[in-house]
Amino acid sequence: MDGPKELGGLAAVRGRVYAFLSSVYLNIPGLDLVENIRHETFMSFLSGISCDTGLSEQMRVGLDEVQRFAGAVREQPPEAVWQQLAVDRTRLFRGIKPGYSPPAPYESSYRGQEQTVMGEWAVSVLREYARAGVFLPDDRREPPDHIGVELDFMRFLAQREAESWQTGARHEAVGCLEMEQSFLDQHIVPWVPVFCHNVIDMAGLDFYRGVARITTSFVVDDLERVQEILHLLLEGNRNGTGA
Amino acid sequence: MEAVRNGTKKSPKKTLSALEAIADFGARLFGGKPGALMSGQAPPEVLEDVWVPSVCNLTNDGPCGIKVHRVNGVTVKIEGNKAHPNNEGVLCPKGHYGILKMYDSYRIKSPLKRTNPEKGIGVDPRWMEISWDEALDITAEKLKKIYLEDPRKLEVSAAERGGLHSSLVTLFGEVIGTPNLKFDGGGIRCSSTEHVHGTGIHAAFTCFPDIKRCNYSIYFGRNPMATHGASGNKVFGEARARGLKMVVIDPVLSVTAAKAEEWIPIKSGTDGAVILSMINVIINELNTYDAAFLKQWTNAPYLVGADGYFLRKEVAAGDKVIRKPLVWDAQDGQARVFDDPDIRERALLGDFDLEGGRYRPAFQLLQEHVRQYTPEWAAEISQVPAETIRRLSAELVTEARIGSTIMIDGKEFPFRPAATKLGRGVDARQNSSQAYLANEILNMLVGNVEMPGGHLGGSGKYKPRSPSDISDDGTLKPHYAGKWKFPPDKIDGSDTLFYYSYGMPQLKVLNILNPEKLSFDYRLEGMIRYHSNGIMSIGDHKMVAEALKKIPFFVSFSIINDEMTEFADIVLPDAMYLERWEPMDLTTKLIQAGFVWQGITLRQPIARPLYGCREIPDILTDLAERMEILDKWNMALNRKLQLKAPYLMAPDRKYEWVDVAERMVRSRGVDWEELKQKGAVGQRRSDKTAYMLYDGNLKFRLPLYFENLKRVGEELKNNLLKVGIDWWDTSDYVALPYWRPSVLYSAPAEYDMVCTYHRSVLLGQATTVNNPYCIEALEQEAYITKARMNPAAAMQRGIRDGEYVYIESQIGKVKARAALSEGIFPNVIAIGGAFGQWATPIARDLGWVNIGAITPIGFERTDPLSGAMEGHGLAVKVYKA
């Protein structure tokens, strides 16, 4: 079993992945995204990581799709690429109308009635946020069960876990892990993969199809990962070999 | 640690390296944008369980008070507010379902920009989400260009049910300076004829029987129990319990007809014939009418010459000389000015030689004019039996209790508890003005106009305030009268083709497509739209779509991606009604005829607008600031909202809407905090105030003889001929209404049925067709989602109950499921009036049909007096699909 340093490192990286995924769903892309996609170093970076044997098959396919998109738009004017991305993102993530868009990415819409937000799941996640001491600022009007907000909550928990491991606050770190497991199990995994599946089906561009595949692969794997860590920590406690 | 996934053990290092790669991947793409959540000093957890008073106003009889239950920040229930004076706790289904409108996952969540230059029905706009700043910058730049170049190039269409916000969008158009202020209403959805003529007779936008005191009412083509919502039906229910009798004359056994004493089927579009015949029966057969009323309150005694105009005499009025009509004083045997206080007996009948000419009282002319309209003649046209027409006429006269009086709050009034009322089934017709004016005369005959129990002005009622509101002949000046202009300023061409002018959207469509016809010297370059859905409500969807495509810049303020919005270039999502500050007058609309209460009621937000939506006045203020017209906007708000010192807005300062709303309330002397707490502050008025003709400070007369129409019609005809327009029909500008057959029956013989539409209380005046609860309830209704047709007509065509049929007009066809019923005139097929969407979420997937899709638009299908469109009936053929 790895020690606190390794667990802290893993949590920090997981936090970075959640930050990235949250940003995908929350922020309107700017021209900088296009520049980043078309940047030569990004292309070579993509070629490099898709060979990473630690990646799941689903994750690899997602990266390949992003890579394919990056290759296809390399010669296109940046404005045109930006518009394509913005249009696809708006259709996929903003719930314009049924049949045209997937149901908007709110937990309440996926686990309650499709046409409604602010259902019991929104109330439930608000409670989780309050328990963890975080809140949505006043200028953020998205319902609390928006995919980007829920992923940001996971970012927050993972980062706090990382800090706890780094400062030797094992009890707090385990507490964070338990909250992460609970939130993934009770909230994210029951619906985010369904939404991502819709995006994969309806995406017009490989970019968001790939990102959706990366998202679903990551959150499903992450639940298993967190469960395993907690399991091993528990076993370690029993055997007296815990981190 | 070993990671075990999918039965495959992965090394921790590989896992970490893979995740680092993904994290790097994300960082390279998206950088380090801040997250959504904040940590640190979290606000205390909101633990609340409150009921917030607010206002619904989704239906005709609002504003209805509501109480909204909010638990820990989440709206969980809406109920009628028992303490609210307008509705006393009742609330229609639309009101109860408001939460689904608020928490609709398909609301527009942020400003959108169109990226697809192609526009059309079903064409994907290819929206891209943009920031508020970008959206406002683009919109303000386009609008400012129009403002500086030629404000007429802007069309502003705001048609949300009754709220203040809608009128502020119109105000914004006025500030910019455009005369083009409605791309909705007046089409297949609106009683525009009543609006146009009602102001000149009742000083009101609408009319209604005095339900509180009326004992007998005849409704032509009107279905108030479906269109008025729960508060209206409460009033109806109380009146019915008291003994109000109702007769409904309609091709369709409507909801109202089903509750009435009597349903009389009529051939579509022939109501005017029956009304004219009833006038004839009352005057020439029964010879029983309220002569005293006619003499005192109408122009019936005015002497009319052979030229059709009143005999007038010049009299001094202050420093002016005006020409007043004369009447014959039967006792003195001489003609006197109509309002001469010394007149002893105004003659209604007779033939007098005066000043070298032959003159007869207007009533005498009416008596002679209507002789041609016998019940047998009307029966032939309308299929309403002659004996029924005679019986109804007699019942109306009897129930009106001519000569009776009633004490109201210490004052004795004439009591005429009987009335007839037209609905959109008659109003939304190419021949509607003649029917409307005839109906007014019918009511005048029994002396009930603006009298207790009778035929009253309803919503939009204003009291004539000064002598300048009254014409020289003692009647009200028409409210919608405009100044003739050629080429027209207004894109509907109404300032050229009409004397009256109230929204004629179908003519806008025609003129946008063919501006040369009326020699327009400008073209529309921009459009602002707020909650109206003209493409669904005007008619011929394809033609309206072509017109919309001609407008280069279109901004839609909308909460959903509906049909109009899909033509927009920029979409700005506004707050829905549970998220707004909106003070409103505490007066009910139609049923209670605008009296009962005086005061103010408040729509207040239950929560801040979801997503990125914003209240429309704040959006307009942002636009005004960017357009550098903030000063004009603030001054216009001061005027419109009747702000008073010290609550007046300064011209150069930007105000938040909630601040302005508070100023509005305080300007009326009402405490803002008290209003927020109670939801409504006001006082009950005496019922006397409703009967303005008898009790008002300013006296005026009712036009039984429409001399003014005749005059302005002749002027209009001359003006048109001067500019070479000889194709526009001015023959309806007559002093006495006549029978004008509907254009409906000029279609080729193969179109042998009439398609009409009807509404449900679940719909109408509000965007509820995308509300899942409303849809579920609608599905339980027997006919509203189907095509109701008579079994005899179905059998002739081999159609069985439940089978699909095509309903085909001269411009297209729709497919609907037949529902057979004896409750419909044999040659009529009726469909629901709010469906057929292709864009509106949820509604688009219902597969129900819309009459607009097959309703032709044309100058020849327009009422030449009021601009109403033949939208309530159209010639169709029906066959099995």
Image (cartoon, coloured by chain):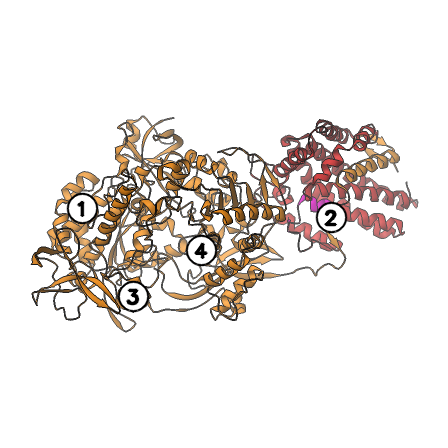
Chain colours: A red, B orange
Furthest residue to the right? A241
Residue for point 17% across, 70% down: B341
Q: Which residue is mark 1?
A: B388
- Tell me where residue A208 appears, x and y as whole percent: 68, 34
Magenta-highlighted residues: A140-151
- Whether residue A150 appears in magenta in the rendering, the answer is yes
Residue B206 in the figure: left or right of residue A46: left
- Tell me where residue B242 appears, x and y as whole percent: 29, 60
Q: Are marks 1 and 2 on the same chain?
A: yes
Among numbered discs 1 and 2, the one appearing first in the sequence = 2
Among numbered discs 3 and 2, the one appearing first in the sequence = 2
Among numbered discs 4 and 1, the one appearing first in the sequence = 4
Q: Which residue is mark 3?
A: B467
- Tell me where residue B622 appears, x and y as whole percent: 58, 54
Q: Are marks 4 and 2 on the same chain?
A: yes
B689 relative to A208, above or below: below
- Whether residue B15 appears in magenta in the rendering, the answer is no
Among numbered discs 3 and 4, the one appearing first in the sequence = 4
What is the quadrant of the C terminus of chain B in the image? top left
**Marking on residue B35:** 2
Q: Which residue is mark 4?
A: B91
Q: Quadrant of residue A195?
A: top right
Chain identifier of the residue bearing label 4 in the image: B
Q: Are marks 4 and 1 on the same chain?
A: yes
Q: Please state which amino acid type lies under the numbered disc 1.
A: Thr
